[in-house]
Amino acid sequence: MNRKKLRALVLSEFPTEYDADHGYITGVVKIEHPGGDVYEIGQFQSEKQIWESCIVEFGKGNPNAAQKTRKSG
């Protein structure tokens, strides 16, 4: 069976959002981008599927957030 890999990118503006999101991700590995951002990659498991998930906190009002989403790919 050929199953498409499921992926999710979760962008958090506030530390409380980030902490809540982080609680659902297992097997977390931190990856630091040369630009200084820290991405955490792990797995989120729903009832029937496992998602490769990446979470990052960009901070409130970050004008470069959209640009930074390209880095995480």
Image (tube, rainbow, N blue to C red):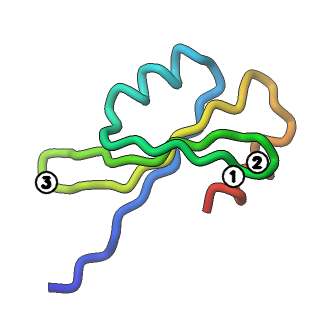
Element carrying mark 2: helix
Q: Quadrant of residue 60?
A: top right
| Residues marked 3 and 2 touching at CB (< 8 Å) | no
Disc 3 target residue: 48
Estimate the x, y position of residue 72 in percent, counting from the top left.
63, 55
- The residue depicted at 63 percent of the width and 31 percent of the height is 57
Q: The disc labelled 1 sits on which kind of residue?
A: Thr
Give the label on residue 23, or none. none
Report the quarter where the N terminus lies. bottom left
Left or right side of 23 for 72: right
Element carrying mark 3: loop
Indicate which disc, 3 or 1, sits on the residue closer to the N terminus: 3
* Vertical comparison of 11 with 1: above or below: above
Disc 1 target residue: 69
| Residues marked 1 and 2 touching at CB (< 8 Å) | yes
Estimate the x, y position of residue 22 in percent, counting from the top left.
42, 29
Disc 2 target residue: 66
